[in-house]
């Protein structure tokens, strides 16, 4: 981006006479392209809202937890929820120059997915309808505990959404600690530190196929199949 701005500055300096007259939209686009700018999707960013000191601290903390997991001193997991629907954003597809791919404009029939992802890529996931609540979160944790009862200290990394740290969850945390399960909350706007966010991104932008958006049932069936085959047919190599 810096080089593009430098190129634009140089171009403006050498074409001051042109700037003295009104520019057409076509001319302005040509100027920007010559300077190295590109028309592309705008991405949302949370960095301006993050606490830099806390982010640095938690990056170091997570690195220490990952190393402890590798030494078998504890078990490290990541938890999060995400919503899916028939009106996806940021969807890409290979398209010929002469024919565009379209999705029907449709709404509703959305659902959510909750997942526990371990540091060594084990996944326990749940699809459900309706809003996420503290009771739903507690139920997911309890079911996960039945499948993966802690044999040593176990840490789950998650964001600090209100339903993750409500009074009901606070009451359960002591019970979970007695079972060697501990929750590690991330700082506000620190979702990039949660490894399972990468899984959600791949799911939405790479693994779901266009025909899966035919209706709510085909989408849910496809998502559940992808999650069942994660780490076999669908894989991620984390740095």
Image (cartoon, helix red, strand yellow):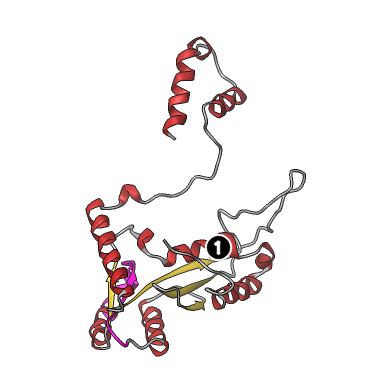
In the rendered image, residue 15 lying in the magenta stretch gets the answer no
- Element at label 1: helix
> What stretch of residues is rendered in magenta?
151-168
Nearer to us in this view, 132 or 50: 50
Q: Looking at the picture, does residue 80 appear above or below residue 142?
A: above
Nearer to us in this view, 155 or 43: 155
| Residue 28 falls left or right of residue 62 | right
The N terminus sits in image quarter: top left
Q: Which residue is mark 1?
A: 204
Other residues around mark 1 within 10 Å, as few (<14) / some (14–19) / many (≥20): some
Picture residue at 25% right of the left edge, 64% below the top: 61
Across and down, in percent, residue 194 comes to 37, 64
Picture residue at 52% right of the left edge, 26% below the top: 35
Nearer to us in this view, 80 or 121: 121
Picture residue at 22% right of the left edge, 53% below the top: 53
The C terminus sits in image quarter: bottom left
| Residue 73 falls left or right of residue 19 | left
In the rendered image, residue 153 lying in the magenta stretch gets the answer yes
Q: Looking at the picture, does residue 132 appear above or below residue 21?
A: below
**Quadrant location of residue 204?**
bottom right
| Residue situated furthest top in the rendering | 17
Picture residue at 48% right of the left edge, 78% below the top: 125
Across and down, in percent, residue 184 comes to 28, 71
Across and down, in percent, residue 181 comes to 29, 82
């Amino acid at each position: 981006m810096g080089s593009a701005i430098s190129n634009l500055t140089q171009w403006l300096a050498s074409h001051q006479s042109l700037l003295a007259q009104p520019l057409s939209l076509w001319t302005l686009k040509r100027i920007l392209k010559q300077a190295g700018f590109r028309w592309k999707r705008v991405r949302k960013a949370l960095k301006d809202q993050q606490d830099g000191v806390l982010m640095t601290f938690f990056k170091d903390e997570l690195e220490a937890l990952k190393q402890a997991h590798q030494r078998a001193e504890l078990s490290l997991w990541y938890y999060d929820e995400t919503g899916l629907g028939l009106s996806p954003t940021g969807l890409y597809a290979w398209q010929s120059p002469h024919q565009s791919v379209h999705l029907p404009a449709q709404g509703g029939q959305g659902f959510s997915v909750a997942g526990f992802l371990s540091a060594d890529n084990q996944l326990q996931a749940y699809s459900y309808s309706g809003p996420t609540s503290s009771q739903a979160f507690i139920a997911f944790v309890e079911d996960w505990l039945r499948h993966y009862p802690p044999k040593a200290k176990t840490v789950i990394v998650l964001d600090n959404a209100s339903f993750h740290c409500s009074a009901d969850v606070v009451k359960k945390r002591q019970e979970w600690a007695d079972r060697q399960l501990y929750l590690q909350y991330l700082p506000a706007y620190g979702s990039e530190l949660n490894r399972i966010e990468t899984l959600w991104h791949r799911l939405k932008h790479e693994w779901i196929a266009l025909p899966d958006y035919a209706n709510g049932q085909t989408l849910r069936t496809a998502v559940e199949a992808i999650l069942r085959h994660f780490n076999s047919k669908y894989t991620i190599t984390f740095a």
